Amino acid sequence: MTEPKQLSVQALQWTGQSLKVLDQRLLPEQIRYDEYQDAAGVTEAIASMRVRGAPAIGIAAAYGVVLSAMRHFPNSEWQAAVEQDIKQLAASRPTAVNLFWALDKMHGLLATQPAEPIAALTQLAEQIHSDDIAANHAMGERGADIIGDAKAVLTHCNAGALATGGYGTALGVIRSAHKRGQLQNVYADETRPWLQGARLTVWELAQDGIPATLIADSAAAWLMKSGKIDWIVVGADRITANGDVANKIGTYSLAVLAKQHGVKMMVAAPSSTFDFSLESGDSIEIEERNPKELLADCYLQDGSLVGAWNPVFDVTPAELITAIVTERGAVINPGQHGVRSLQTC
Ligand code: MRU
């Protein structure tokens, strides 16, 4: 794979001794990196969404395993201590499979008992990181080919550099299409309640000079009805063998609306997002976060008078998706045959 370019926005910076995490809860008002030297800190950074986005949490977890080995090696029972940290990291968030994919890779290497475990684990974590960036560039080009001469797209949540090793999945496609001069406008919906669209995506697009227009989530149907967009382009947290896609809550609504309005729906995700062990999206665990995230915007804030239900992902059935794009290739109309053709092992 070719050497990836340096990127303007970096969610994660590996120093060789520690992991610096851009605290995405503070964006766009404040740019602050927190520095972590152990796996417990990285676990907390993922659980609290300082770092978020499926590929980014997988990469952060891989570095978390390196930090664990640095802390425990060569104490007696160091391997058991690292395995315990891997379990903790795996319990940080349930839906994005990239987290478990990265931890499985790190655990697999640990099990081979490398002679120099810290060097070997560091090399693997760095490889996971750089492969993700390269995959995003490949996906960006492929996705841009598919959206062709689309003039405007809608994206949901943040599937950009902030959510990945760099460049982004959905925003990678958008970046590549914009570079080709194809795309004139990118609509981003707010993505309540955490506002990944309003706080992160439009900020990230603005950094790169890509024209962005923010809409309320509830404006999506009217946007489609107005004929202003040709495609919806989103990322994914887990894609099952039949092509069902778990992504940020609200993606399913957009797919249903897209069908009604003849708008096409693209999902861009690296192969680390595929879970071929699951036949369909029915078996994906959907994270439910603290109701306080919703009640913060409600005038009955204390939660004693009103409840709140806060699922943060949903599953879009494969038949509502026009194209799933990966670094290995694309599947058009995944509802017809699923995505097993992208499985290599
Ligand atoms: O809760 P988040 O912000 O981690 O959810 C992120 C998403 O749903 C993204 O769309 C997905 O992880 C793809 S990121 C390339």
Image (cartoon, grey):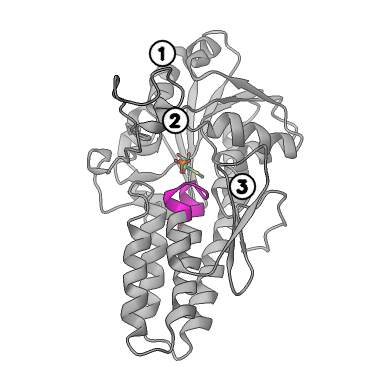
Amino acid type for the residue under numbered disc 3: Ala
Amino acid type for the residue under numbered disc 1: Gln
Q: Nearer the viewer, residue 143 or 38?
A: 38
Q: Would you name the residue on which mark 2 appears?
A: 322
Compared to 334, does 230 lie above or below? above
Q: Would you name the residue on which mark 3 appears?
A: 161
Q: In whole angstroms, how far apart are the C-alphas of marks 3 and 2?
A: 24 Å
* Residue found at x 23% / y 38%: 282
Q: Position of residue 29 (x, y in %)?
A: 67, 37
Q: Nearer the viewer, residue 301 or 182?
A: 301
Quarter in which the C terminus is drawn: bottom left
Q: Quick one: SS at disc 1? A: helix
- Nearer the observer: mark 1 or 2; the answer is 1
Q: Quick one: SS at disc 3? A: helix
Chain-order first, disc 1 or disc 2: 1
Q: Quick one: SS at disc 2? A: loop
Compared to 14, does 197 lie above or below? above
Give the magenta part as a residue range: 45-57
Q: Residues within 10 Å of mark 2 (few under 14, many from 20)?
A: many
Q: Position of residue 321 (x, y in %)?
A: 41, 30
The answer to the question of whether label 3 and label 1 lie on touching residues, with beta carbons closer than 8 A, is no
Q: Would you name the residue on which mark 1 appears?
A: 260
* Residue found at x 33% / y 26%: 303
The answer to the question of whether label 3 and label 2 lie on touching residues, with beta carbons closer than 8 A, is no
Q: Residues within 10 Å of mark 1 (few under 14, many from 20)?
A: few
Chain-order first, disc 3 or disc 1: 3
Amino acid type for the residue under numbered disc 2: Thr
